[in-house]
Amino acid sequence: MLKLETRPQPSVLWTWVAPILAVVITMLAGGTLFAALGKDPVDAIATIFWQPLFGEFAHYYRPQLLIKGAPLVLIAIGLGLGFRAGIWNIGAEGQYIMGALSGAGVALALYPMDSVLVFPLMVLAGALGGWTWAMIPAVLKVRFGTNEILVSLMLVYVAEQLLAAMALGPMKNPEGRGFPGSRNLRNYDSAHNAELIAGSGMHWGVVAAFVAVILAYVLLTRHRLGYHIRLTGQAPRAARFAGVRTARLVVICLGSAGALAGLAGMFEVAGPAGQVTIDFNVGYGFTAIIVAFLGRLHPVGILAAGVLMALTYIGGEIAQSNLGLPAAAIQVFQGMLLFFLLAVDVLTHYRIRITRREAA
Amino acid sequence: MTPPLLSIDRLSKAYPGVVANDAVSLEVRDGEVHALLGENGAGKSTLVKMIYGLVKPDGGRMRLRGAPYAPEDPNAARKAGVAMVFQHFSLFEAMSVAENVALGMAAPPRLRDLSARIREVSRTYRLPLDPQRIIGDLSAGERQRVEIIRCLLQEPRLLIMDEPTSVLTPQEVEILFQTLRQLTAEGVAILYISHKLEEIRSLCDRATILRRGRNVATCVPRETSAREMGEMMVGASFAAPQHVAHAPGNVALTVSGLSMRAPSAFGTSLKDITFSVRRGEILGLGGVAGSGQDELLSALAGETPTAAGAIRLNGAAIGRLGPNARRRLGLLTAPEQRLGHAAAPEMSLTENAFMTGAQREGLVSHGFARWGAARDFAQAIITRFDVRTPGPDVAARALSGGNLQKFVIGREVLQRPEVLVVNQPTWGVDAAAAASIRQALLDLAAAGAAILCISQDLDELMEISDRFGALNAGRLSPIRPAKGLSVEEIGLMMGGAHDLEPAHA
Amino acid sequence: MDLGTIDPALLLASLIVAATPILLAALGELVVERAGVLNLGVEGMMITGAICGFAVAVNSGSPLVGFAAAAAGGAMLALLFALLTQFALANQVASGLALTLFGLGLSALLGQGYVGIKPPSTPRLDIPILGDIPFLGRVLFSHDPVVYLGLALTGLIWWMLRHSHAGMVLRAVGENHHAAHALGYKVVRIRVLAILFGGACAGLGGAYLSLVRVPQWTEGMTSGAGWIALALVVFASWKAGRVLLGAWLFGGVTVLQLNLQAVGIAIPVEYLSMSPYLVTILVLVTMSADKSRAPASLGRTFHASQ
């Protein structure tokens, strides 16, 4: 029979082998799933993981990797900080929407003003929008002890309704012939989050994501605040003993996660998406939770996991058009990844020992 | 000749990296109190857990009245007539006494009938207890009564008691012993775990002594001196801490009229606590578990803010300052709970050294941690306090209790505190480590620091304190010189027999 | 706009119907949390139940079989959670989130081809005599069997937790798993059973949405009902009777805002649709001060190593 033995300390090796193993198992299980759907599993897996990188049209898909990866990484970096401290913001999707609405709101209000100040203002507004939305669960938690998981999540639904209201109401394009959705910001140069190098997929959001990774890395490994974040997550009582002000930490963690998610939303609406529409959000805020865990809540890991998850999005779309693989199958695939990671993770903290059942 | 009630033959149990029991044998006879004596980590708990069906032995066999005995789980053990009073972890705070008793029975009767039986047993054995009360509101002594009554209701033949006196005042201990003698007179056998030698000499008929998982000796406690038993238990004699007499200096820490609401649902509120500690002296505070020790440390450490003037350090009001501001001023603390409070289990010793040493050891510059310096500090603690570990990169969790405690105390002592507050400095620590920790506290006092030592170990307090006081339900007794205090007086300061007296009379 | 067109008896009756999905899910979660486990995957189990129930009901033609399948589907997903948290000792918060994300994807996959279909209708079960009481009869005793099941389950769980031995053991495990283990109770087994029960209840709740309340299948149709159920457990201070009260409150808010939408009040639909979520937050804020009722071991991992 199998027995779990606590390791004296977490295995460093398994910390990093576990996610890789989880990816491999997910590929196997995913392949089985695709086979059950009547697709050739090898073909499907290759389409998802190979085509976007090295396939015939890779030159088209590779930039997509940055475009899809940037919001995931931006959001996951923020979530990761909170998760490390045991602060569970799962409402990033809502903060992402609010960032987009605030950013787009500034642009639409200033339209058609031509100024270099428009874009920086939008960036500021985007961060502020996400931050404000995240401050609601933060303040309620600090002030009333309200569960931040539930509040931040409820606010996703509120934000989605607000998005719909805006797309159909105040932000609707006056020249849109009655179609829902705002003006397209891609046609508004001062507000457009354009590619920095044409055809590379590199836009300001990608830059922001890289900067966030570096800052978070320095924060967590070198700065006292990062130490306090880790300490609070691992041993809350010890953190209070060490002088950590928990309330302040809640505000910082939720605030930075909200601001980063808001930025991601703003860069998206001003660039790849272009306009505020009812279905503007595609679940990056939730997928980023998977990215954060898959990256071990470590900034560099999150970067890698973000790229991997972006790959499944792009590969999934290719598989959808080439093989007729349903979009939902990719969603299941992503969900499985988190499952297997959590399951394999047991090996990081425990050793498995096989024992004979002793004769009674 | 009838076979002994319980005979254990070469029982063994190994955990990864440690052999908890190595071919342990012993016999318990009807109607005797059999002591199981040993240091922390000697394997006493593992042995009784095997007898109670909680842990399966790797080898060896047990017999109950001559018949093979291998309980599958505690239920089977209870059915066979074996009951156990735990030291920790077996009561449910939010549930009533009656429910707690029912949960420990194989086939509990209806709660109403059970309550009646609880009242009956509690009268018979003079253990007053109201079945309707919630456990969280009970004192440590009362909780133990719940455990004992739970066992008695099943009319056990063998009662295992794990360190039962550690939560009692001396007066309560006396009453417990009366109850146990009443039980043995009825033919019940008692397996009594302890490391307190005098107690074993006054109560037990025979003793089995464990050391590092092996039984090293069997003796009749009444005919053996405490010193002899101590040496058998520890394996060697070592120097008792040296108390050098010196005149105390100025008052360093003053606490006046400190009151604080309990921070958690079943915590203890502090009520009007007043005392002061001088440089160079050790003030010992006793009291049974749950008398407000944790809360007092929390208030002094700055985890819970109090009225500004309630706590003064060298005359300055510091009641509203946080932990780090207090550290900067020289007030350092070491809480009882090693893992999770004094240290973060998963973090390395370097990171744990940084935890409280950041200020005074200059381990931070411009908000950034100086990990190299922190590592040196951790290494210094390890070297100075003889912490047995491969190095400062090891996680705190990987250290034994004694070594981690040496690290935690050493971390504060090395920061040259003006005032040091410790809670249970040697709890669950082996004798050698305990002696070295006590010596460190005495040396620190001799060097001019003021020390407040909160402990539930009266022997320890008598050994090192200059003055003594006791906490009792969140209040502090008057402080008296430690020299010349009798056990009787100390017990009364701790609250005597609490509410047992009326039933006693 | 004319508020007079709203019939109070009908409003109350539809309130009870609207409350049923979250009532079922919250009752299940209540049992899970009382056992000391926090399963944040209610939303995922609900929506899995919604599609399992829908698909099976459509294919078999029997709503009853559909509901049974929904309970099984919810329990299957809960089993994954149990494997992760009780055997692989994974973090419960992360596992619950994983369950929700996985459930949303899985249901979308399973639900392909069921969009736009009408399910067989669940028959109403008018209770004789009681159903004829004016007003009350229409409010309380003229519903489908699942509504009665929800009410019966409330009573049953209340009684179990308060008066039965099994309920006492369940509470003990949630209160202090080390103590329960030391007394010989099988902590993991009890928790796994509770988790499965919670999954079955969530599945039923989800199926009630797709088979009765809406009734059709759309992706993501639970739209937060599972999370509201989780909030309800906090609101109810882990007590069955108050779960019912809370469910009716939310049912009331939902029905009221739908009625307001229907009568064409001059507020955009989107703002009305926010109201259940905002009410949830409001309720959480007012109820959060008292956490003392939470099971003491809630969310903690149990490993019987020592």
Image: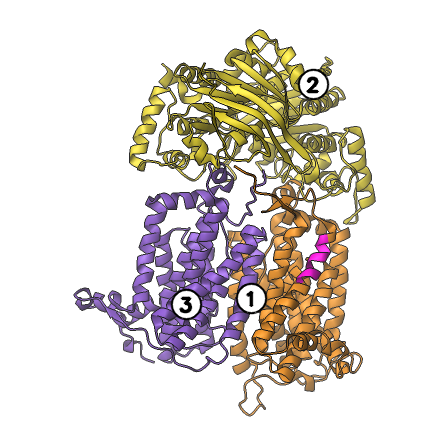
- Label 3 and label 1 in one chain: yes
Q: Where is residue B290 in the image (x, y as percent from the top left)?
A: 51, 30
Chain coloured yellow in the rendered structure: B
Most extreme residue toward the bottom is A177
Image quadrant assignment for residue B478? top right
Amino acid found under the numbered disc labelled 1:
Leu
Q: Is residue A109 left or right of residue B500?
A: right
Label 2: how many residues lie within 10 Å, few (<14), some (14-19) or many (20+)? Answer: few
Q: In this view, does B376 lie to the left or right of A135?
A: right
Quadrant of the drawing holding the N terminus of chain C: bottom left
Residue nearest the viewer, comparing A312 with B468: A312
* Residue linked to disc 3: C69
**Tag shown at residue B235:** 2
Q: Colour of chain A?
A: orange
Q: How far apart are marks 3 and 1 (CA)?
A: 21 Å
Residue range of the region highlighted in magenta in the rendering = A14-22
Tag 2–tag 1 contact (CB < 8 Å): no
The local secondary structure at tag 2 comes to loop
Amino acid found under the numbered disc labelled 2:
Gly
Task: Judge whether residue C16 is colored magenta.
Answer: no
* Residue linked to disc 1: C101
Q: Chain C is drawn in which colour?
A: purple
Name the chain under label 1. Answer: C
Quadrant of the drawing holding the C terminus of chain C: top right
Label 3: how many residues lie within 10 Å, few (<14), some (14-19) or many (20+)? Answer: many
Q: Is residue C153 above or below residue B311?
A: below
- Label 2 and label 1 in one chain: no
